Amino acid sequence: MSAGLEPAGLSAGIEAVHARGALEAALARRSWSKVTDDAPTHGELLTLVSAAGRVADHSSLRPWRLIELRGADREALGRAIDKSNGDHGISSKPLRAPLLIAVVVSYRKSKVPHWEQEAVASGVAHMLSLLLDEAGWGVLWRTGDYTRSKAVAKAHGLGKNEKLLGWLYVGGKPVQKRNGRRKAVDARRHVSRMPRA
């Protein structure tokens, strides 16, 4: 691809991010615990992942991968969740959104420690959630004890060098009478200087 050319099929969501600006997009972002049955297509998702994958990455290891769960895949996850609880049914939790994106850290053999590689995978997930939100999709990152369940790991086909960090639940944003708002972050409480010797 020539320098300056963008991939074909660039979604309107990406163009919206450019037009609005990253600061405005981040300030407007919120989690959506309830979503509609609409979801981005595979092609739309690939465009957003291409952008999300540009996060800071020590040694450019790309120690992550994403697993797309749609339709019956969500039921398979529901069975794995119930199995990890000693039950034989299908947990309804994965059915709360039409698209689940499993976030996986794939550890690479490197001088870069595992915690840094996990930070990269988490960064991709955060960036992707922001891009999805800005493109008009409702997103919620779900985690929990299930991420370390052997049954859930097997259902996702994880390798020995991989761990599940959670799922992005993705769907359409429902029409709401009031916009949900998070409390503003008081940056002064979270930014300080080095202590003097």
Image: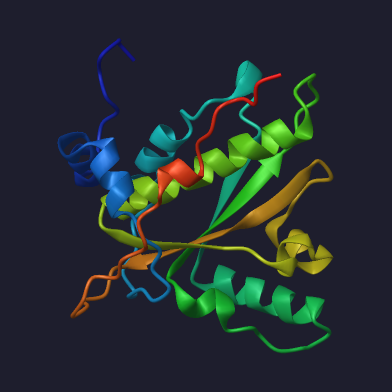
Residue sitting farthest toward the left: 19
Image quadrant where one finds the C terminus: top right
Q: Residue shown at 73%/82% (left/top)?
A: 82
Residue 84 percent location from the top left of the image: 80, 76
- The quarter holding residue 152 reads bottom right
Residue 132 percent location from the top left of the image: 35, 51
Does 56 sit left or right of 47 as displayed? right
Residue 80 percent location from the top left of the image: 73, 74
- The quarter holding residue 4 reads top left
Is residue 127 or residue 172 the one in the foreground? 127
Q: Residue shown at 49%/46% (left/top)?
A: 189
Does 105 sit left or right of 125 as displayed? right
Q: Residue shown at 65%/85% (left/top)?
A: 90
Image quadrant where one finds the N terminus: top left
Residue 145 percent location from the top left of the image: 74, 68
Q: Is residue 37 above or below residue 140?
A: below
Residue 127 seen in the figure: no
The way the protein has been coloured in the rendering is rainbow
